[in-house]
Image (spheres, rainbow, N blue to C red):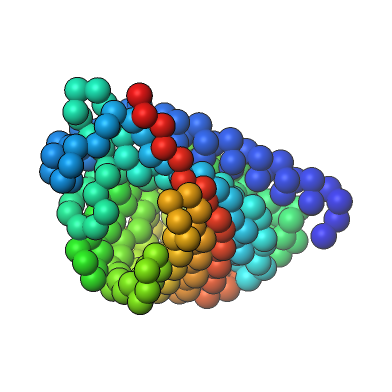
Amino acid sequence: MSRSCVETEIQMTAIRSFSAVAFAAAVTVAVPATTAQAADDYGASAPPGIEFELGAAANVAPRYEGASEMLVTPVPLIKINRLTLPNGFQIGGRDRGGLSVSPSFNVRGARKSADTPALTGLSDVDLAIEFGAEISYEAEYFRLHANLRRGFGGHEGWAGEAGADLIVRPMEGLRVSAGPRISYADNRYMDTYFSVPAGTAGFAAFNADGGIKSYGVGVGLRQDFDNSWAIIGEAGYDRLTGDAGSSPVTAVGSRDQFSVRLGVVRKFRFDF
């Protein structure tokens, strides 16, 4: 990879990291009341304060959706576990089980023909930040979850994922989950990433419509060593389908999308 490409990736990583931190700070204040539970619903009342996790991970994923080339980038890991206000209003704090609604965000890197010569002729797509919400239900041995986000920047459509996981805890502090996944997007998202305008040199015209865009499987692992540190690992496989799989953009890359992430987090608690 050329020096200019390396510098570009570093700049993109910095933008992603800043966006994630800024959003996490915002949702800490603005998360909707639908995620709240009274403190006594969790047993002993938690003192006013906040519990959260900060960390970093190495992420291996396709350079863009539909690419065959893989890219390694550092990513921030941020999670708000509990926020309890002085009036007893509490968000989070439940170890296992229950229905919850929480913020969801994602960052999609820019797609540039300068990085992938096979895309020469197609318009570049800027970096996009997605904001939305996730709803989930977790019991002792399974979890159901779905999210939906609106894009800003590179695309202005809606996209999300849904899945179901089986959960096992084979030893103290270790949590392993795995299950099927689907992803979906509306017409504006699909048009941005998978449509090809008529007259584009080297590509047949193609109009991508919204719908299910991939199906696959995800695996997650978390090992908590103590009250301060944990290791997190994730792996996934997705197969692009529908118009996403049939697009000429995908034809110069791959319908098979793999991803791996490994990171470490530090847990923090501050009482008000």
Please say whether residue 148 is visible from this viewpoint: yes
Q: Is residue 84 left or right of residue 111?
A: left
Please say whether residue 103 is visible from this viewpoint: no
Q: How far from the left and from the top, in percent, is residue 236?
A: 47, 70
Residue 44 versus residue 38: which sits nearer the camera?
44
Quadrant of the frame with the C terminus: top left
Residue 263 versus residue 188: which sits nearer the camera?
263
Q: How far from the left and from the top, in percent, is residue 50?
A: 36, 34
Q: Vertical placement of 115 versus 166: above or below?
A: above
Residue 15 versus residue 166: which sits nearer the camera?
166
Q: How far from the left and from the top, in percent, is residue 49?
A: 34, 30
The mark tally for this picture is 0
Q: Is residue 150 left or right of residue 154?
A: left
Quarter of the image where one finds residue 45: top left
Q: Residue at x 46, y 34 (%)?
A: 23
Q: Residue at x 64, y 52 (%)?
A: 74
Residue 73 versus residue 141: which sits nearer the camera?
141
- Residue found at the far right of this picture: 3
Q: Is residue 100 left or right of residue 191?
A: left
Q: Is residue 67 left or right of residue 33?
A: right
Q: Residue at x 20, y 57 (%)?
A: 97
